[in-house]
Every structure is written in structure tokens, then in C-alpha cells.
Amino acid sequence: MRAALAAREISSVYRLLRKHGVSQRQIAAMTGQSQSEVSEILKGRQVMAYDVLTRIADGLGVPRGYMGLAYDEATAIKVVGAADGQQAEEDESVKRRRFLAHAAQVTMGAAVFGPESGTWSAGPAKTPAPGRIGMTDVRQVEAATRALRSLDYQYGGGFCRDAVVAQLSWGQQMLESSGTEMVKNRLYVALADLHSLAGWTSFDTGLKDSARGHFANALDLAKQGDNHPLVANVLYRMGRVYLHQDAPNDALKLFQLGQIAAQESGSELAVAVLCANEAWAYAMMGNEEQAVKLLGRSKDEFARANLAEAESWVKFFTETDVYAMIGTVHTVLASKNAEHTKYAIPALTKAVESYTDDMARSKTFMLSALATNHLLEGDLDHGAKVGSKAVDCAEGIKSERVKDRMRPLQVEAERRRNNADARDLADRLNSFYAA
């Protein structure tokens, strides 16, 4: 295989994959090609174009250097200083399809390609890991993940992403260490959760390709650790990435796959999270009926959930978050039908009142949405006052996502420039974005 890759003989590469049981459909899904293209290559068609070769390398999880293409992640960092530049030439819709195919394979139980499909994202420089590991080593990974996640909630992904990736670099090497089966299974889950955090902090800083790579690795490790709730959680987080990219159809598919995993786990709380986010996707698609229906189911599942025995990765979803999701979904619907402000405002108000300083980013999201609803409702004075609080909070957070989530507030403030309060808010928001 290495010889075929070095010679860029893609026909030979694909034939070797077929020989080892990888179907044409799987190859197509991983490389973003059609089955007819894969078939033609298998018959001998040469692949010469750089962008196609890089897409094939990335799709199969092969370091680009194996094909003499350079620009693996480490090279890209040295040359251009941005780890996310490595896949910029690939169409985003193709990447979304490829991740969705991978997620479906993991969730529905199909074999995941290769012994280690974890080459979605290259690892940074390595630090020596123990030759043999025990539960203490795994607990250290879990403790580091908890501490770093707290920093992310409070200060944003930009504050802690590098630390997460550095911790992951060391933790990932422990997969090569010896240990009991119980220890190794717990390590799979711990590293899956750490990859999930790396994906979330990458998303928060605008590195969507890195986010996708980490979430794909998280899925594989969670599946290997036989942890359905964590699979559901990873799918929920990747779905949120797609919502953020204004791709609600793709997000909905991931949320639905996540719901399957959540139901298999028997976790009502995980199902509540997925249903709430499905409602968000439907709201973005303009399907008011389904959005409201899924919100209702989310509330019902949450009411039935045993919060004390819930898996750690879904314990973040408290009653405050239920109100936050109700407010968020109705805010999206209010952009098309202002009647929804009467549902959004009470829910968002409760969420804002309940979020503490250690959840500063979430509180900023809710303040921004609340201010937007007040402007839509015509209460410009109060809307401007709440909007100003949102900007106060946002200024202390390193998060591209915060800036993006505040755009609707900026739009509504600009539309009301004839009002002095709205004009002042618009000016302040413009200064915030220019900083």
C-alpha cells in the first residue's frame, strides 16, 4: 500500500482496499467521490489533480506526505501557521457528507474503516507515555478534561484549545501502552471525551476542519469503549457545528443518529438533548410544527430523566439549559413570526437569571437572544439595555462563536437606527466586531 501511495497509483490503492473488504460505496463516502468515479479509477483511470489526490489522502486518513503531497497538519502549521488550512480546497458540502457517512457507520454498527480510523487529524509532537498504564493514569486524563472543559465554558475555546490538544497528544500515546482490558476500555472513553472537547474548542475558535477531525476520532473511540451516551453526545456536538454553518439539514441527520445512540443507552437526558437540538434544526428550516413538537418531547424526556444517575457527559443539560433551548428555538422562529417572542422572552429570562459566571459564554448567548427578542417586540429601550449587557459579557470571552451568535442582534439594532438607544447599541456592536 505504501508503494502504491508513493507512486500515486490510486487504482492500486483502491484495489487493495477492495481486496480487504472495503466496498466501493465506503471508498466513495470517505473520499467524497461518486461510486462511478471510484469504479472508473478501479478500472485504471489515473488521478492527476492535486485537489483530488489530497481529498483521497484525507478521506482515507493517509498522511499527505505518503503521496509526496506535503501539507500534512504539522507541515501546514510550520508553513502558514494555521492547522485548519490543510483541507481548505475541499468543498464543505463534501466534507459534511463524508463525516455523516462516517457517523452513520459508527452509530449503526458497521465496521469502521481500518484498525485506526483516528487519522482524521494528525497529532502534534509526542511526549513519552508510560509503558504500562493503570486506572490512575486514566483518571488523570479524565481530571484534565474536566478542568479544561470548565475553562472552555467560562472563557471560551480560544483560551484553552492549545492546552486541550497538548493533553490529547500525550493521552493518545497511552493507546500504545499495555494495560488490563478494563483500563483500556476506560481509556478509550476518556480519550473520546478529550477528543470531543478538542473538537468543541476548535469549533469555538472557528477551526471547523479540526473540529470535524477530532469529533470523528471521538466517535471511533466512544464506539470502541462501547459508550452509547458519549456517541450521542459527540453527534450532538457535530450537529451543532453544522447548525452554526447554516446547514440544518445535515445537522438534523446527525441529531437523529445521535438520538438512536441515546435511546440505545437508555438515557432520557441524552434523548432530551438531541430532541431539543432537532427542534432547533427544524426551526432553522422553517418547520414550526416539528420544532414545537420536538421541544415538547425534549421537556417530557427531561422530566423523566434520572439526573442523579445520568452519564457525566450529559449532566451539563440542566433545567436552565431546557429554558435556554426553548428560548433559542423560539428566537429562530420569531425571526419569521414575531409572535414567538412571547414564548422566547420568558424562557430566555429564566436562563439568564440561572447562568452563573462559570457559564459566561452560554449566558452571553442568551443575553444576545433576549435582547434580539425585545427589539423584535418593539421594546427598544429594554432591548438596548440587555444588548449592552451581552456585549459586556462577550468582551471577556475568546470565542468566534460568540461573535457569530450576536450577529442577529447587530442586524436588528441596525434596522432601528432611528431610535437613539438602538443606534447606541448598534455603534457599540460595530466597535466590538472591529476590535
Image (cartoon, rainbow, N blue to C red):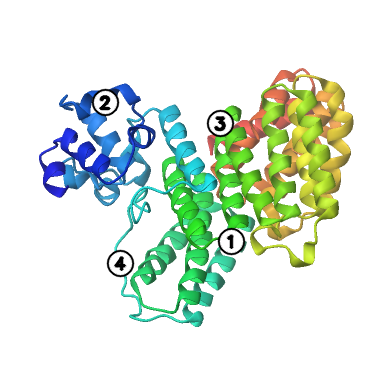
* Labels 2, 3: front one: 2
Q: Is residue 426 visible?
A: no
The amino acid beneath tag 4 is Lys
Q: Are marks 4 and 2 in contact (CB under 8 Å)?
A: no
Q: Judging from the image, what secondary structure is the residue with disc 1 in? A: helix
| Label located before the other in sequence (4 or 2) | 2
Left or right of residue 287: residue 65: left
- Badge 3 density bin: few <14, some 14–19, many ≥20, Cα 10 Å: many
Residue 396 percent coordinates (x, y)? 62, 51
Q: Residues within 10 Å of mark 4 (few under 14, many from 20)?
A: few
Q: CA distance from mark 2 to mark 3?
A: 27 Å
Q: Position of residue 310 (x, y in %)?
A: 72, 62
Question: Can you identify the residue that label 4 sits on?
Answer: 126
Rounded to the nearest whole Å, what is the CA distance between mark 3 and mark 1? Answer: 26 Å
* Circle 4 SS class: loop
Kindly identify which residue carries mark 1: 149
Report which residue position mark 3 lands on.
250
Q: Looking at the picture, tell me which residue is in the foreground, 388 or 235.
A: 235
Q: Look at 51% across and 63% down and name the residue there.
A: 225
User: Answer yes or no: do the residues labelled 2 and 3 have beta carbons within 8 Å?
Assistant: no
